[in-house]
Amino acid sequence: MTTTAGSRQALGAYGEALAERHLVAQGMTVLARNWRCPAGEIDLVLRDGDVLVVCEVKTRSSLGRGTPHEAVTDAKLDRLLRLGEAWRVEQGLGRVELRIDLVAVLRPRQGASTIDHVRGLV
């Protein structure tokens, strides 16, 4: 089946909303959504206690192109670290612990969606 840009965007928005609800239920506080700068975008920026969390959300409707986890490469992690530092500087925050998390969402055509929150990729 061919997917359109609109359907991919809707799937991504669904995954980000589900991830946000999950993380807030875990006690985190959302600081920013879809923050952008010239170097890229952060899906969610959160606070987990004293830790600044940059969260990448990857949503898939099937495993035909791999798991959501496989989409987070070393290059992507490096970019997320740089983006997290850029966000911190823009907000005028001092040195804070920065953690990179992944929320992998699988939304099959039938059945319930699954969420896997992976803490501390970096």
Image: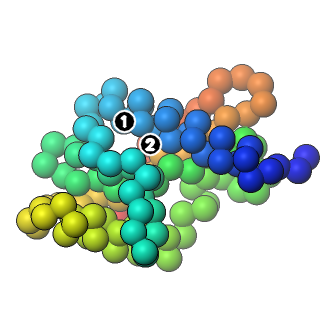
Q: Can you say whether 110 is above or below 79 in the image?
A: above
The residue lying at 57 percent from left, 55 percent from top is 69
Q: Nearer the viewer, residue 2 or 49?
A: 2
Q: Residue at x 60, y 45 (%)?
A: 12
Q: Earlier in the sequence, mark 1 or mark 2?
A: 1
Vertically, is 108 above or below 49?
A: above
Tags 1 and 2 touching, CB below 8 Å: yes
Q: Residue at x 29, y 58 (%)?
A: 99
- In the picture provided, is 97 more to the left or to the right than 39? left
Q: Nearer the viewer, mark 1 or mark 2?
A: 1
Residue ID for mark 2: 117
For the residue marked with disc 1, what is the amino acid? Leu
Q: Position of residue 29 (x, y in %)?
A: 25, 38
* Mark 2, other Cα within 10 Å: few <14 / some 14–19 / many ≥20: some
How far apart in space, not on screen, are marks 1 and 2 (Cα)?
Answer: 8 Å
What amino acid is found at the position of numbered circle 2 in the picture?
His
Q: Is residue 77 visible?
A: no
Does residue 96 sit above or below 11 in this rendering? below
Element assignment for label 2: strand
User: In x, y percent, where is residue 112?
Assistant: 65, 24
Residue corresponding to mark 1: 23
